Amino acid sequence: GAGVSQSPSNKVTEKGKDVELRCDPISGHTALYWYRQSLGQGLEFLIYFQGNSAPDKSGLPSDRFSAERTGGSVSTLTIQRTQQEDSAVYLCASSFGTSGQGGETQYFGPGTRLLVL
Amino acid sequence: AQSVTQPDIHITVSEGASLELRCNYSYGATPYLFWYVQSPGQGLQLLLKYFSGDTLVQGIKGFEAEFKRSQSSFNLRKPSVHWSDAAEYFCAALSNFGNEKLTFGTGTRLTIIP
């Protein structure tokens, strides 16, 4: 079956512009996660969704970052007024459930490489 | 604080040689443990995972890992590496209640020489 897909694969934007990153999870997966991978910070958790709600937004670095998930499927991560330090690879993952439900394994998409000039 | 440590930033091994990548975790209770591999420009691919039970787990591509509670370790091994194993390897942990975020180590970059 299809894995996690993300679009675009690459995005170049100018400082101050808004960007939207999209994630399509594996069909049937109820949990969805966003991570950021950057040279200086490694792999960092940003936010996770269980269905359409986000119980944990603790990793979002600032209020310029937001995410939503609709219909229990597709998620969009939005970065407003991008800064150069936002340049990173944004990875999305999904899992069948959560750690309390026996669906602990997270499967990752290929990522979106964001470059802010 | 919960953390995962990969002490080796970069390892070079000869093709056909054995491999061991180290991983240590610091959690209040034993977490779920994972190894992922990332090839250049690619996402993370799951190699194997440990939840409970047998402490030696087998994964894809001939990899295995051994969980040692006394050492808080989950080291990845392969008896004979292939050139295609060159990649970055990440150990990760997940708390087994409530907190759903994966905590990753900093990664070990593996180089294979002929």
Image (cartoon, helix red, strand yellow):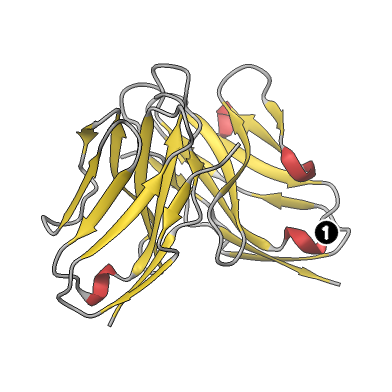
The spot of residue A92 in percent (x, y) is 40, 48
User: Mark 1 falls within which chain?
Assistant: B
Q: Is residue B10 left or right of residue B25?
A: right
Task: Tell me how many marks there are.
Answer: 1
Nearer to me, B109 or A55: A55
Tell me which amino acid carries mark 1.
His
The residue pinned by badge 1 equals B82
Secondary element under disc 1, as helix, strand or loop, is: loop
Nearer to me, A117 or B77: A117
Q: Residue furthest front?
A: A71
The spot of residue A82 in percent (x, y) is 19, 70
Which residue corresponds to the image point at 14% horizontal and 57% vertical from the top-left?
A62
Q: In this view, does A46 lie to the left or right of B67?
A: left
Nearer to me, B50 or B25: B50
The spot of residue A3 in percent (x, y) is 54, 42
The spot of residue A40 in percent (x, y) is 36, 68
Which residue corresponds to the image point at 32% horizontal and 57% vertical from the top-left?
A21
Within 10 Å of disc 1 (Cα), the crowding (few <14, some 14-19, many 20+) is: some
Q: Please say if B63 is above or below A96.
A: below
Which residue corresponds to the image point at 30% horizontal and 40% vertical from the top-left?
B1
Query: Which quadrant of the rendered structure holds the N terminus of chain A?
Result: top right
Q: Please say if A95 is above or below A6.
A: above
Q: Residue furthest bottom?
A: A117
Q: Please say if B92 is above or below A30.
A: below
Query: Which quadrant of the rendered structure holds the C terminus of chain A?
Result: bottom left
Q: Is residue A49 left or right of residue B74?
A: left
Which residue corresponds to the image point at 36% horizontal and 67% vertical from the top-left?
A88
Nearer to me, B42 or B16: B42
